[in-house]
Every structure is written in C-alpha cells, then in structure tokens.
Amino acid sequence: MTDAVVGSRATPASGTGPRLDAKAPCPRPPMGWNSFDSYVVYLDEEAAMVNLDHMARILQPHGYEYFVVDGGWFEERDLVPGTKRPQRRKAQDCRLDKFGRYLPATTYFPHGMQPLIERTHAYGLKFGIHIMRGIPRKAVELNLPIEGTEHRAADIADTSDVCRWWDTNYGIDMSKPGAQEYYDGWIALLASWGVDYIKADDITAFPAEIEAVSTAIARCDRPIVLSLSPGQDTDPDLVDTYQRHANLLRTTRDIWDERDDLDIAFDAWKQWQDRGGPGFWPDLDMIPFGRLKVRTPAQAPVVNDVALQGRGLERDCSLTRDQRRTFITMRALAASPLFMGGDLPTSDPFDLALITDADVLACNQNGVVGHLAWERDEVEAWLAPNAAESGSGWVGFFNRSEEATTVATSLHHLNVPGSTVHLYDVWAAQDLGTQPIGDDLTTELPPDGVWFLRYTPGP
C-alpha cells in the first residue's frame, strides 16, 4: 500500500486509568521550546535541527529540557518554489502507515523523525510531538486495519465528530471494539520512536479519549508526559479527569503577542490558581517572544491564504518590553510550563535574558502556583511562597491598565509572615534592603508593567 497521504464525549468510568502525582515524570513545570509560534505547522527538519542546536547551547544550561515539534509534521504540501513556504493553508495529503497512523511527511521531514529525535537525546534533552485526537480521515476512507485486531478504521470512527479548526481526523467512539487498541498502537509507535512528551490537541472536551491516551501511555514501557489542548474548550467540571490523566492542561486559547492576550492569561490564572501542583500544571500557553510566523513573510507575494495557520504575518514580538516583563513574571508566579515559541537563532538578547533570568526560573520551578493576594483599582499583587524556605517567596505587583499608576501597600497586607523582610527587585537587579513587614512599599508602575520582588526573612 502506498503511504496514505480527519469521538466520543462519554465520561470515563470513575477510578479507571493511572493517577499522576508527584512521582509522575513532571514534578515541576516542564520547560522547553515549541515550534508553533515561529513555524506554526510548517517546521522542516533543517530548521528543527538549527533550533535544537541553539536550544542545547542557550536554554539547556538553564534547565530547559523538552524540544517539541508542534502540528503539521505529517502533512504533505506543495511549496512555493525555492522556499519552505506552503502554497496554501490546507495540506494536499497526509502520510500514514499501514495501520492508519501518522508518519512524518516527506515534504518537511524527508529523512523521517529519527535523526531529529536521536540528536535531541544525544544532547541529553527530551523530545516532544503534537498529535490530534482521533483517527485520520484518510485511514477511515481507506478502511485500514487496526493493528492486532480484526477491526478496521471505519469500525471505530465517529464521522459526525470533526475538529472545527483542523479537519484531518475523525473522533473515535470509545465504546466500539478496537478503539482502545487503536490508541494503544498509536502511542506505542510514538514511544518506539523515542517520544518523551505528547501534546494532545482537540481533546480537552472529550474525557473518554483523554482516558484512552492516558491508558495507552501507561501501557508503554516509556514514561511520557501528557499535555492537553486546546484551552478554549477546557471545562472546569472535568478537573478530576484532567488531574487523573494529564500532566499539563491548557487553560487559554492560543496566546500571541497582543495586549488582549495578557488579560486572557490573567483571567485563566485567576480561575485555575487553586488547581495546580506537582504532576499537574495549568498551562498559560507558550512564550511568543522573538521572531514569529517565519513561514509567512509580510513581503512575500500573496499566494492563496497568505496568513496561513497562526495569527498574522512574520514579525518580531510586538509586546512592549514592559509587557514582556509582565508576561514572563506571570508565567513564573503561576508555575506555568515555560515553552519558548520564537525562532531561537534570531531571538534577541533581551528576550533570551527574560526567559533565562535566575529568579524567573527559581520562582517557576519552585512549583507553587501563585495566588491573588491583594488588589486595588487596577493593581493586582500575586504571591508565590517558596516551598523550600518558610517566610520566603516572590511577589509581583501588576498594573493591569494602559495608564501609569502608583502602587502603595505592605507585605503585611499580603499575609507574608514574619516581622521583618529583605527585598530584592528582580527586574531592576537592585537590593532593597531589610524593612519591617508592615512598612509601605511604594513604586510607580508603567502601563502594563510589573514590580517583581523576591522576599526573604529579615535578620
């Protein structure tokens, strides 16, 4: 057979499947690089290798660990001659094995995924990959067999269930014989490649298929971190399912480099501030710093849908420096997974300094989801105590408005313990000395700005 070139909402039975806790493979928020913000679904093996080399040199020394290839790696496309840019938004075909499971497309990965995975592991890093919920529509159209069973793709597909924003798959009816076996085989194939991290998409509203992926992972000999997307479909009523079966949960829609994205992330943080911890991390999405949408240059001639996937055209991150400090401080205090999304070879020193800042990483890897401790007018104070040192931690005073403002309060009002406190201003890199816990803290905050402080007990 030529390489083939898109579900059920039933609630899973209570108590089934493995429970992930602090002994699971991600006791702290994962950190890494993800290809989506820079390459969307058009990453090729050469660009992947270059970004991997830069990750190993620039980010790995700071604890970044996961190199993740996002969607589209299985799609065959016609390219604009002389470029790696697709001619149109929708793929012409997809590549499958004989059991209806995706394989790397020859368009962007002519040597397959193994050279990239092996190079990732040779650096001591871990490899992640994006998958879509369900079974490829092409596998159903060809009615391909399900490995190790008498069943075929058409037996398990729910053809009325198609992702509204990427129609490559049909959902799987998990009540049908062969459904779990399909997921078992699909995840086992990825494990055999050496995959360490799976970003499962279009799945947060489908608990039965979440359990199916989790069960398949548990049946592998390889530990695999499971991340669930998309955030706009995340349902707080399903929190028990998410916590039982996943390590990461997207709580926002795709976050880009616009001011509204800051507000969306703050709202999600507020909603999920009491739900995360070791083994389960609410995810505010990737870090859109650096060069974005590199396959959609603004100066390119319009060919079909010029914007292609993702938001906008090629650009540098449009957030102001103050907004970027707010963005990364939020991720630190929220203990949100840290995945750089911009193109690493072209990232500027300011952005790289933000994502490798020692206090950002210490606060984030502290693994305590910060809580809203105080608010007045347009200012919010979010606090993350240090899990390893009583009376220590980090606090961010955020200006949620587009106008400059003044913050005036004390750490006593934030219920920080002790009688005296020593303060360090992270972004000013300034030691503020020791003061009584009840003394006022006052500073001017720029529009969308943040005052990020580390506190420790005073003498």
Image (tube, grey):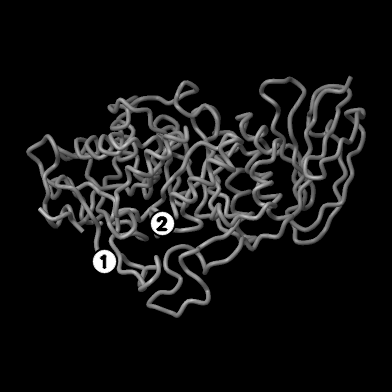
Instruction: Name the residue rendered at 50%, 56% in the picture.
Output: 37
Mark 1 or mark 2, whichever is nearer to me: 2
Tell me which corner region of the image, top left, top right, bottom left or bottom right, holds residue 330.
top right
- The foreground one among 236 and 106 is 106
**Vertical arrangement, residue 196 with respect to residue 6, above or below:** above
What separation in Å lies between label 1 and label 2 (alpha carbons)?
A: 16 Å
Identify residue type, mark 2: Leu
- The foreground one among 438 and 284 is 284
Report helix, strand or loop for mark 1: loop
Image coords of residue 34 (percent x, y):
48, 48
Decide if residue 361 is on the left or right side of residue 428: left
Q: Which mark is residue 92?
A: 1
Image coords of residue 89 (percent x, y):
37, 68
Image coords of residue 335 (percent x, y):
60, 36
Instruction: Name the residue rendered at 71%, 50% in the picture.
Output: 325
Instruction: Name the residue rendered at 38%, 53% in the picture.
Output: 45
- Return the residue at label 2: 43
Question: Which comes sooner in the sequence, label 1 or label 2?
Answer: 2
